[in-house]
Amino acid sequence: MIHHNSTVSHILCIQKNTTFLKECIYVINIDMNDYIYNYFATSPDYRYDSSELYLPEEYIDVLMVQYYQQLKVLYNLGGRKVSLFGLDQLGCTPLIVKRWPPKGRACKQLLSDVVYVFNNKLKTLVEGLIKDKPDARFTFINTTSILQKKECKQ
């Protein structure tokens, strides 16, 4: 948001008008690596104290509060069309499976469970924004659901 705010300020100096920002489409995605390295990483090179301060669901709640605050800033700057992507299946990524081999499963279950909770809370956050900001369009895109292997009926 710092860079966006700076850009908007620069545009405002040039054009004296930022009403066109309501026509922009904002795409927001928390990358899997951000989540993995900010919470689950055990390497000293990537270590944050998040996992020592919070249980997995508490950390998700902290992220949702921060996410909401950033979305309010974006809205106040003029953002009205926002797409928010959920997390992919962290527990099934090759890096995770190699680094923390799941026992008898294809995916690391704890990480898959965290993704499920995170995505549900993000969806709820987006639903709240839709109600609170009727002049804006917020869309939740559940990539985990899209990418899940579907069984075909014959």
Image (spheres, grey):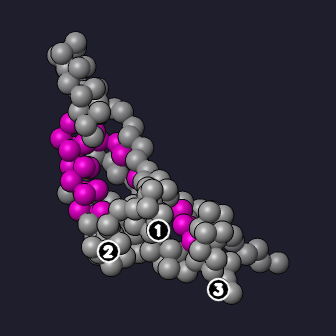
| Foreground label between 3 and 1 | 1
Quadrant (top left, top right, bottom left, bottom right) of the N terminus? top left
Residue position marked by numbered label 3 in the rendering? 103
101 horizontally vs 131: left or right = right
Q: Position of residue 13 (x, y in %)?
A: 18, 15
- Which portion, as a residue range, is magenta? 63-91
Quadrant (top left, top right, bottom left, bottom right) of the C terminus? bottom right
> Residue, x 49% and y 56% (percent of image)?
33
Q: Residues within 10 Å of mark 3 (few under 14, many from 20)?
A: few
Q: How many marks?
A: 3
Question: With respect to residue 141, does 99 lie above or below?
Answer: below
Q: Name the disc covering residue 52, or none.
A: 2
The amino acid marked with disc number 3 is Lys
Secondary structure of the residue carrying tag 3 is loop
> Residue, x 76% and y 74% (percent of image)?
152
Q: Nearer the viewer, residue 133 or 90?
A: 90
Q: Residues within 10 Å of mark 2 (few under 14, many from 20)?
A: few
The amino acid marked with disc number 2 is Glu
7 horizontally vs 16: left or right = right
